[in-house]
Image (cartoon, coloured by chain):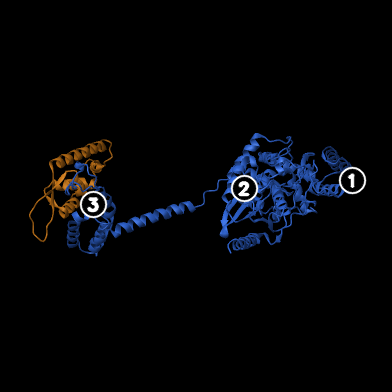
Amino acid sequence: MPKRKLDPLPAAAFQIMLALSAGELHGYAIMRGVEEQTGGRLRLGPGTLYGSIQALLEGRLIEEVDRPGDAEERRRYYRLTAVGRKRARSEAEKMADLLRVARARKILRGDYV
Amino acid sequence: MSEKMFTRLFRLYPSRFRKQYGDEALQLIRDRLRDETGFFKRARLGWDLVADVFTGLPQAYRNSYAVTESEPASSNSDRIPSFRILDKEPLGRGSILIGGTLSLGTIAAFGFLLSRPIAYVPLSGSNGRMSPIESVMERLNRATTPVDATVGGGDQVAKSTAVGASEPHPPSIPTPAKTTANAEVPLLPDESKNGIDEPVSSASHDRHPVKLQGDVIAPVAEHTSLDATERHRVIAEAMANLRQHYFDREVAQQTAVVLLAHERNGDDDAANNGVAFANLLTRQMRDASNDRHLVMEYSRDVLPERPPGLAAEDLARYRKAMEQQNCMFRKIEILPYNIGYLKLDSFPDTSVCQSTATAAMAALNHTAAIIFDLRDNSGGFPGMVTLIAGYLFDHPEYMYGPRGAPTEESWTRSPVPGNALANKPAYVLTSASTWSGAEQFSYDLKMLKRATLVGETTRGGAHAGTFHRLDDHFGIGIPEERAINPFGKADWEGVGVEPDVKVRAADALEMAVKLARASVTTKRAATTP
């Protein structure tokens, strides 16, 4: 059961991984990163965000980073693991394949993609 | 506000999730509250939080939290059984609330679905409009008006429950009571002779609606004005049948002579329609023979020519109809004070319905008193009358039926093994539409002083005769055996069975319950002083 949580990779989890590909981020930064990279379409709420983070941690696709911060504002930072990076790449390739097919079928209007 | 709302919503998450991410999540909200100001953004935040519950909750519950948490204490390596606590704190109020609401909602939805009326599927009838039972009832109710013949099945049920009251009569009929008796004759469930053939054959005869229309309309025109030759033919046929079938040759001869005399005297000349003529002949035959069981029937529809007998198809149709109608056992209830209540709308054939009947009686076996509601019962098979009555006796009892000499079926098979009703007070509810077999049940139990009849005088159809077809439209009911009434009186033919306690049919149940309650409580008081 737990193995299948990330298979297929949920959109939220993939977005988090993409956000983390830029570097180590804490929860709020991830949320902002996702919002930015989706053009404001996806704003992860705390439940979805930390639920996905927990799932990714359990799947060892990301890991928590120890980062000494201020005492009053201790935030947890996360980063992609090697496995996570590989998985993100394969996921992106899958999408690229899809995109190619879509383009070949002329589903996409124009040729800007 | 959003923070408060969030903390509430956050209680729905699993405790381990809350422990692990509670602070972080709250921090995230604070960050957003700090960054997103203005009405629109705040509203969006509120919406996000609510939407988040729907997407985030399942995810949060799917996670195992095993990896990031310390490993569960000792693995079971030393083979000591141990319990693993899945959740360290009791369920939050929010979880209970959500779970409770969802369960209630589901139950309510289920209840709602159950309470919805199931779409009415018309019993596939012989002509696609009516069930066999309904077509039988239709045939009964169909006196003479052509309108009535074409009336659909829709109001037949209502009619069948109050046959006596709603019997349609053309205005020209002088004696409506006899017409009803006439109409009923072909329904004699005399298994050995015409059995259930009649009702069903009338149904099979409805099978071709188009043809039926033709049959109905043309002969009506023809028969509304009976001429002398036609009348003579019917009288001649009736005389022949009387001489051949009536159990008393002398009376038959005498009756035949009277019929002929009436014709010669011109007494029949006024009767220029079928129903009036049939009623007239019935009166003449009864006057001459002093036998109320002689009856002449006129049918607007062509009477089936088929010799009486049980076609397998008819039986199958009857069986199916009975199964769909729970063998006409309408209600089986135990009322307060442990009073059993059985509403039975027919006495169906035991070969089809015996198990239903025994189950019904078994369900009421331990009641302190029993009420049989026959107010809507239109009769049926003597075998069932005997079967049900059998529960009220501890020794075989003779159930008088007007149809002829006693048969094996005339005696109850009492005592019924395991039966506890033999000495319990019994009540029979009657109405003006209680009929035929139901009247036999009422009459015999009354005469045997085994039940108290509560309600109205019954309709008065003894149906002793066997039906003989004279021509396409006329038939005659002739008793073929002398029935000896052990109670030394005339039976209920034409007069009905009088109740012991006369109340309106609508009030009969209330009255019977009152009587039963009184008898139950006095008995109880007597046994436990």
Residue B511 on image: x %, y %: 65, 62
Residue A1 on image: x %, y %: 26, 42
Where on the picture, by quarter, is residue B368? bottom right
- Mark 1 vs mark 3: give the one in front: 1
> Helix, strand or loop at disc 1?
helix
- Mark 1 vs mark 2: give the one in front: 2
> Helix, strand or loop at disc 2?
helix
Q: Mark 3 lies on which chain?
A: A
Q: Is residue A77 left or right of residue B262?
A: left
Residue B443 on image: x %, y %: 73, 52
The residue that disc 1 covers is B258
- Give the colour chain B carries in the figure: blue
Where on the picture, by quarter, is residue B526? bottom right
- Give the colour chain A carries in the figure: orange
Q: Is residue B415 left or right of residue B116?
A: right
- Mark 3 vs mark 2: give the one in front: 2
Around disc 2, counting alpha carbons within 10 Å, would you say few (fewer than 14), some (14 to 19), or many (20 or more)? many
Give the amino acid type for the residue marked by disc 1 in the picture: Val
The residue that disc 2 covers is B328
Q: Nearer the viewer, residue B55 or B228?
A: B55
Q: What's the distance in space between the residues labelled 1 and 3, CA to CA? A: 101 Å
Q: Which of B333 and B324 is in front in this view?
A: B333
Give the amino acid type for the residue marked by disc 2 in the picture: Met
Q: Do circles 1 and 3 both sit on a common chain? A: no
